Image (cartoon, helix red, strand yellow):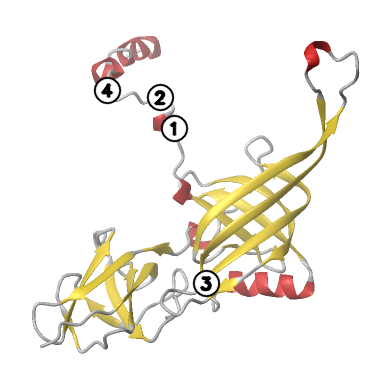
Amino acid sequence: MRKNDFNKLQLFAFDSNDYCDFTSSVAKAIAGKDILLCIWNLDGTKLLAISGQQGLTINRSADQIEITSKDTQGGWKSYLAGMKEWSIDNDGLFVPSDQSHSILSQAFENSDPVCIKVVDRKRKVGMFGGLAVVTDYPIEAPHDDAVTYSITLSGMGPLVDLSTAPVEPDTMPDGSAALETLTVVSVAGTSAGQTSIYVNPVLAASDKYFYRTGTAPLEYPSYGEIISETSWDGTSPISGLTAGNQIMIIETDAEGKTLKAGVAEIIVKTD
């Protein structure tokens, strides 16, 4: 079939795209979960996705220079864009044992710049890159929830748009992913001493569940970390847990490498 004939047929594909329009902006939208903030290690040989990350905001702004004068037409103010600046706000679950957080902590303590890169892990392309300093890095440890971090990276020089200025090679972080969050709910089981656990999203095919328990807050594993905790089939009630402690459900791949994790306060069925 000739290319022109194929293109003509495409006009009538999917019932003329009446309800499955692959040309629409919705079909081309990018999911926020696929966008990762990464940093290079100290010698620039390894790109690391910041472990535990959840929220990500890229801020870009320019100084406002007013150029309004008495003869400005229509009574409207006029401006020029002045000096530009950028910053990145990021937050998530704090994983102190992960190399990415060790690098960020060291950079903050020494007032050193870090080289950052924002990537689309689904399309395997870089989006932005630049040099920044850590200007805010609080860690929150509530008594009844997971330890979290938030960080502000303030730009030094330009934030390079890699979609218009692509680089070669376009390096992706190891594993091209970061630890994803599971929503875990604990309720009293059907028999005394039992706890029932519900997890969302459901377990992916060939993946496995493990769990750890203890007083809050439990430390999260790093993405890709090999897990050797107690295994769980995802449905059976769990016995012998201490009410009020935390339980962490860890989802791994078939090789036991951590992919996702989430915590809940343990609720136990009493007599």
Check disc 4 and report the residue beneath it: 19
Looking at the rendered structure, the kind of residue marked 1 is Lys
Whole-number angstrom distance, CA of label 3 to CA of label 2: 38 Å
| Discs 3/2, front | 3
The answer to whether one can see residue 68 in this image is yes
Confirm or deny contact between disc 1 and disc 2 (CB under 8 A): yes
Check disc 2 and report the residue beneath it: 24
Lower sequence index among marks 4 and 1: 4
Residue neighbourhood size for the residue with mark 4, other residues' Cα within 10 Å, grouped as few (<14), some (14–19), many (≥20): few
Check disc 3 and report the residue beneath it: 94
Residue neighbourhood size for the residue with mark 3, other residues' Cα within 10 Å, grouped as few (<14), some (14–19), many (≥20): many
Q: Secondary structure at mark 2?
A: loop
Lower sequence index among marks 3 and 2: 2
Q: Secondary structure at mark 3?
A: loop
Lower sequence index among marks 2 and 4: 4
Looking at the image, residue 62 lies above or below residue 200: above
Lower sequence index among marks 3 and 1: 1
Confirm or deny contact between disc 2 and disc 4 (CB under 8 A): no
Q: Position of residue 2 (x, y in %)?
A: 36, 12
Check disc 1 and report the residue beneath it: 28
Whole-number angstrom distance, CA of label 2 to CA of label 4: 10 Å
Q: Secondary structure at mark 4?
A: loop
The answer to whether one can see residue 168 in this image is no
Q: Position of residue 26 (x, y in %)?
A: 40, 31
Looking at the rendered structure, the kind of residue marked 3 is Phe
Residue neighbourhood size for the residue with mark 1, other residues' Cα within 10 Å, grouped as few (<14), some (14–19), many (≥20): few
| Discs 3/4, front | 3
Looking at the rendered structure, the kind of residue marked 4 is Tyr
